[in-house]
Amino acid sequence: MASDGPSNVIDPSIFEYLKSHGEEEIEVGDKLHQITSALNRHISTCQGFLSRIHSTPSSKLSPLLKQVEDDGIKPEVEKVGELAQFASNYPYYKYNHKWTRSIQNVVTTILLTGWLGGLGTESRPGEVGRLLTIEEVGELLKVPVNLKDKDAFHITIEEYILALTELTEELSRLSMNSVTMGDIDLTVRISSFIKDLFAGFQLLNLKNDIVRKRVDAVKYHVKKVEDVIYDLTLRNLIPKSETSS
């Protein structure tokens, strides 16, 4: 005989709650995908402009860097601003995996452009060999960096370090192409910079496995440039004093 006691049916409001929050996550994810896809297109455009540095003598880089800034980096800045405004409405570490690689690529384009002498200001003109700090990158992108006391969009230390490893890889390639363009001074400057950067990396106590492996790989970029310098020295194309600087 059926019991007349209270039913054990689960409260349907539980599933209504799960449904509404599940739908919200899907909507947030879709919006983030839309923004990052647009950002990635701007990144590809910027990287395309920057790829021309490998066939452009440093004496003729100024017009190219101007194009990079106007048609590459400015659109990146605008789209990062849109991403930051939207993403800051939601828990940072719940969604940051959706954009962290894109942000790393944006930072890399900025660091490379700055190193080549672009992104100068009235107070500080651009100069070859300049390494922008994470604070300067954040200021350019108009977003905070390394936030600790607020759950909002920001540039992380890890993203900056990973971008530095990408910078060394791109510069090691440029060091070889600079030789073919007859710009040996740039090759020497790149060699000194990459070695100094790698030495600085050794001072860091890296806990993130991905970051540690990428930083460790910089030694191969150092070796690639050292081989170029060694070959140039054997051919007496650069003074030996410069190779030890």
Image: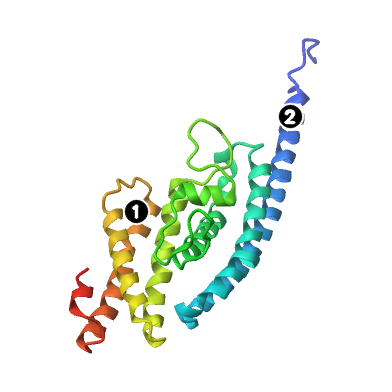
The quadrant of the image that shows the N terminus is: top right
Would residue 135 appear left or right of 29 to someone viewing this image?
left
Res 185 quadrant in image: bottom left
Circle on res. 17? 2
User: Which structural element holds mark 1?
Assistant: helix
Instruction: Bin the neighbour count of mark 2 within 10 Å (Cα to Cα): few under 14, some 14-19, many 20 and up.
Output: few
x 40%, y 76%: residue: 173
Please name whichever residue, 167 or 212, is drawn nearer the observer in this view of the structure.
167
Instruction: Bin the neighbour count of mark 1 within 10 Å (Cα to Cα): few under 14, some 14-19, many 20 and up.
Output: some
Q: How far from the left and from the top, in percent, is residue 142?
A: 59, 47
Contact, mark 1 vs mark 2 (Cβ under 8 Å) = no
Circle on res. 212? 1
Q: Between tags 1 and 2, which lies in front?
A: 1
Please name whichever residue, 22 or 208, is drawn nearer the observer in this view of the structure.
208
Lower sequence index among marks 1 and 2? 2
Q: How far from the left and from the top, in percent, is residue 50?
A: 53, 72
